[in-house]
């Protein structure tokens, strides 16, 4: 997918979190309700996946199944780790996939401004 995980410590000052999230322009923020409530104004227009609310919703469902509304989020025919519906990856596709970012870690930077370091997927294999 090309998506990368960006860990952000919710104990950081709001200004630092805003600087980090401003650089990465997140599509979705995975969090808990208390953190979301504190930071929702820092990242307006972003989709929030609020884990404690999702867990409460799952606990209230007596049965999980195809009609429960809970799914993997994958389109039919896709599986985790596949680059196409058939699941095949050619050599050149594999090379490209290895260069996609898996996560970005932010340091304080020499100027005090958070600086991101991108880790490609291939780095996890070494």
Image (cartoon, helix red, strand yellow):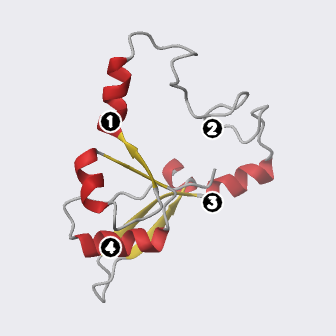
Structural distance between the alpha carbons of marks 1 and 3 = 34 Å
Structural distance between the alpha carbons of marks 3 and 2 = 14 Å
Residue position marked by numbered label 3 in the rendering: 99
- Label 1 sits on a secondary structure element that is helix
In which image quadrant can residue 63 be found? top left
Camera-side residue: 115 or 46? 46
Camera-side residue: 44 or 100? 44
Q: Earlier in the sequence, mark 4 or mark 1?
A: 1
- Label 2 sits on a secondary structure element that is loop
Of circles 4 and 1, the one toward us is 1
Q: Is residue 87 left or right of residue 44?
A: right
Residue position marked by numbered label 4 in the rendering: 107
Residue position marked by numbered label 2 in the rendering: 81
Q: Earlier in the sequence, mark 1 or mark 3?
A: 1
Q: Is residue 75 left or right of residue 56?
A: right
Q: Are marks 1 and 3 in contact (CB under 8 Å)?
A: no
Q: Position of residue 116 (x, y in %)?
A: 42, 72
Q: As displayed, is residue 16 above or below residue 8?
A: below
- Label 3 sits on a secondary structure element that is helix
- Total marks drawn? 4
Q: Is residue 48 left or right of residue 55?
A: right
Q: Position of residue 117 (x, y in %)?
A: 44, 70
Q: Are marks 4 and 2 in contact (CB under 8 Å)?
A: no
Q: Earlier in the sequence, mark 4 or mark 2?
A: 2
Structural distance between the alpha carbons of marks 3 and 4 = 21 Å
Count residues near mark 2 (Cα–Cα under 10 Å), then give few for <14, some for 14-19, many for 20+. Answer: few
């Amino acid at each position: 997918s090309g998506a990368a995980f960006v860990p952000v410590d919710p104990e950081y000052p709001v200004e630092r979190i805003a600087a980090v999230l401003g650089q990465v322009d997140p599509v979705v923020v995975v969090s808990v309700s208390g953190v979301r409530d504190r930071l929702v104004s820092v990242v307006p227009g972003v989709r929030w996946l609020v884990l404690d609310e999702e867990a409460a919703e799952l606990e209230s469902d007596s049965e999980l199944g195809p009609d429960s509304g809970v799914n993997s989020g994958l389109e039919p025919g896709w599986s985790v780790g596949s680059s196409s519906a058939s699941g095949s990856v050619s050599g050149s596709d594999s090379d490209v996939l290895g260069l996609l970012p898996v996560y970005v870690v932010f340091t304080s930077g020499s100027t005090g401004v958070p600086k991101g370091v991108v880790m490609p997927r291939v780095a996890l294999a070494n």
